Image (cartoon, rainbow, N blue to C red):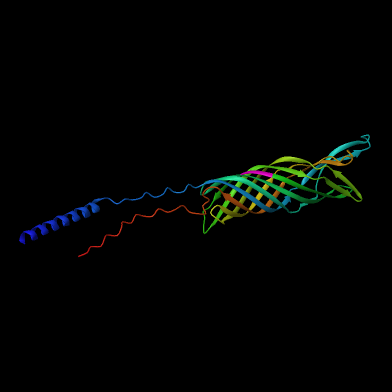
Amino acid sequence: MLRMAKQFLAAGLIAFAGLLSAHAADLAEPPVVESPPPPMEFGGWYIRGDLDYHWSDFRGADYITYGVCVDPCGAVAVPGSNSFSSGDLGGAFSLGGGVGYQITPYLRTDLTADYWFSSDFDGSTADDVSVSTDTSSYSAWLLLANAYADLGTYYGFTPYVGAGIGGAYVKWDDLHNTIGDVTTVHEGASNWRFAWALMAGTAYCLTGNLKLDVGYRYTRINGGEMFGLAPDGPGGAGPGYDNGFNVHEARAGLRYSFGNSGCVPPPVPVAYEPPAPEPVYK
């Protein structure tokens, strides 16, 4: 009987020693720490579409005049020059689009093309003997290469400032010059001109890739030919050259990003937490 008790006690001690050894091995094994996922790359291509309403400030115009010298010139047309006494341009809508690239969270660039619908022109000219009223309109294509500084995203809003440089293709309609009951039609001119712009606004995250962009843009367009010589030739006036425009635009549009737009922040790695210790039973 005593011998059996000793054998049973020895077996129990062996089993207990095995359990302690296994538990010690578990404690000595280093914990497995999963590496955090790589952060999302910021940036990528985007496309945009815009609608705006713009107001153009007419910066004046000059034109060539032809007075007829009868004596002692022998009825020869003598050229001179004159300027518009007044000029005003109405407002109009425009549509635009573009493609761009978000370089960093704070810098992006794009290329844009906008079509400005016709703005009506009303002006007047005066000389020593008469006063005329003049009507026309102009439309334009505006092509710009732009760069923007995004000033950070706050509760989904991203304010920005930017600048652009490019050109404008300005198309003037025929100019109708009226003195009394007589109207003279001058053919409108079309030409490319240098243009630059300054803009400011804010974008709002609608989804993870789509932003609403609302802002203001100031565009300066250089001067160019406005109208040609009237068909009746000397004795009339032309060609005429405008001094350019200052254009103020209220803009709204959508930007769709194909990469990380900043609306959805990248995942934050979770710190490793060791597993809870196993309960010890006594």
Quarter of the image where the N terminus is located: bottom left
**Where is residue 157 shown, x and y percent of the image?**
55, 57
Quadrant of the rendered structure where residue 276 is? bottom left
Number of numbered discs on residues? 0
Q: Which residues are magenta?
A: 142-146
* Closest to the observer, 198 or 82: 198
Residue 119 falls left or right of residue 17: right
Q: Residue at x 68, y 45 (%)?
A: 142
Q: Which one is nearer the viewer's eye here, 112 or 33?
A: 33
Query: Residue 149: x percent and y percent?
Result: 55, 49
On the question of residue 146 being in view, the answer is no
Task: Judge left or right: residue 258 versus residue 55.
Answer: left
Q: Is residue 116 visible?
A: yes
Q: Main secondary structure of the magenta part?
A: strand
**Image-based side of 44 in relation to 111, left or right:** left
Vertical placement of 9 versus 178: above or below?
Answer: below
On screen, residue 208 versus residue 11, left or right, reads right
> Seen from this angle, which residue lies furthest front?
1
**Percent position of residue 78, x then y:** 87, 37
Residue name at image x 19 percent, y 53 percent: 21
Q: Position of residue 233 (x, y in %)?
A: 88, 38
Q: Residue furthest left?
A: 2
Tell me which corner region of the image, top left, top right, bottom left or bottom right, holds residue 77: top right
**Near-viewer residue (221 or 265):** 265
Q: Quadrant of residue 282?
A: bottom left
